[in-house]
Image: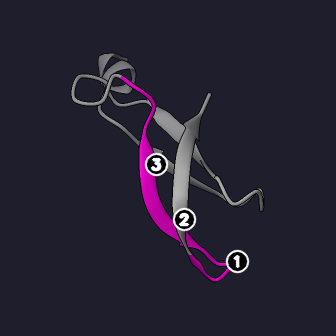
Amino acid sequence: MASTDLRPVVKLKSTAGTGYTYVTRKNRRNDPDRLVLRKYDPIVKRHVDFREER
């Protein structure tokens, strides 16, 4: 149980407004704030920011 509290599963949603999402894990100790990653969105066919949604 303790391992799931430290590295929860988070959903990353595209800021391009397409609704495309990635699912990943994050380390709460290193990244306590909301995660923002630049990843590929196949709907708009380019890299955009993906923000963590809760």
Amino acid carrying label 2: it is: Val
Query: Mark 3: which amino acid?
Result: Thr
Whether residue 20 appears in magenta in the rendering, the answer is no
The part of the image, by quadrant, that contains residue 6 is top left
Q: Which segment did they paint magenta?
A: 33-46
Residue 7 in picture, x, y percent from top left = 35, 31
Locate residue 20 relative to residue 31 in the image: left or right.
right
Query: Disc 1 marks which residue?
Result: 44
Front disc: 3 or 2: 2
Residue 22 horizontal/vertical position (percent): 57, 56
Could you tell me if the residues under marks 2 and 1 are in contact, i.e. CB atoms within 8 Å?
A: yes
- Mark 1 falls on what kind of element? loop
Picture layout, residue 22 above or below residue 1: below
Label 3 secondary element: strand
Q: What quarter of the picture does the C terminus occupy?
A: top right
Distance Cα–Cα, label 2 vs label 1: 9 Å
Q: Position of residue 52 (x, y in %)?
A: 54, 38
According to the picture, the residue beneath numbered tag 3 turns out to be 24
Q: Is residue 26 above or below residue 40?
A: above
Q: Secondary structure at mark 2?
A: strand
> Where in the figure is residue 19, as x and y percent of width and height?
77, 56
Judging depth in this view, the residue of 6 and 42 nearest the camera is 42
Q: Which residue is mark 2?
A: 48
CA neighbours of label 3 inside 10 A, class few (<14), some (14 to 19), many (20+): few
Distance from disc 3 to disc 1, alpha carbons, whole Å, reads 21 Å
Q: Tell me which amino acid carries mark 1.
A: Val
